[in-house]
Image (cartoon, rainbow, N blue to C red):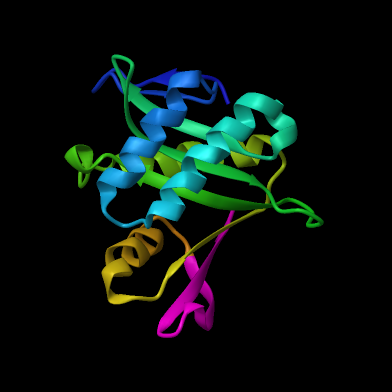
Amino acid sequence: MSDMVSAQDDVVFRSVVREQDASDVRHMVHATGFFTDEEVDVAEELVREHLFHGEASGYFFVFAERQDVMLGYACYGPTPAAEGTYDLYWIAVDPVHRDRGLGKRIVAATVDAVRALGGRLLFAETSGMEKYVPTRRFYERTGFTAEAVLRDFYRPGDDKVIYRLEI
């Protein structure tokens, strides 16, 4: 994915991972209020994995920023042992910049990147808990369809909802 600039609002989308991204991702994911401390650690670790191993890590990123300030990001990668299938591991938008269409633009940039890699399907997952209704609605508004529900997956009473998007 090449870096792009939107003249409307000076938001830049980039795929190159920088050292500062690890702490920026940690801060942003924590600020959303949707993730546990362990999940925040994982989000940061995936950036560090890419910094250490590059593309061999299997983790790719789309960062949305304005004047070098991260506004949102997505982490995605190929699904092991599946042809043309990718997983959207993370997507987050800084709470200050929510409800302005940025998440939808990040998904579109991610889809473009997956398409360029020969991807045909993109899967995302989230919790079935009430707190995640906005997340599920977001996926549905961006073209994903609920493909499966795994009951009590994360813990009793917390289902895993798997979404699918054809590229």
Magenta stretch: residue 161 in it? yes
- Please determine whether, in this image, residue 157 is positioned above or below residue 62: below
* Image location of residue 132, percent across then percent down: 32, 67
Left or right: where does residue 45 sit relative to residue 53? left
Give the position of the N terminus as an image quadrant. Answer: top right
Left or right: where does residue 127 sit relative to residue 102? right
* Image location of residue 153, percent across then percent down: 53, 78
Residue drawn at (37%, 30%) of the image: 24
| Dominant SS type (magenta) | strand
Magenta stretch: residue 58 in it? no
Q: Is residue 112 visible?
A: no
* Image location of residue 55, percent across then percent down: 70, 30
The number of callouts visible is: 0
Residue nearer the viewer, 56 or 110: 56
Residue drawn at (45%, 41%) of the image: 108
Residue drawn at (62%, 41%) of the image: 114
* Image location of residue 8, percent across then percent down: 24, 22
The magenta-colored residue range is 145-167
Name the residue furthest top.
67
Left or right: where does residue 127 sit relative to residue 54? left
- Please determine whether, in this image, residue 45 is positioned above or below residue 65: below
In terms of image quadrants, where is residue 20? top left
Residue nearer the viewer, 120 or 18: 18
Q: Is residue 106 visible?
A: yes
Residue drawn at (60%, 35%) of the image: 60
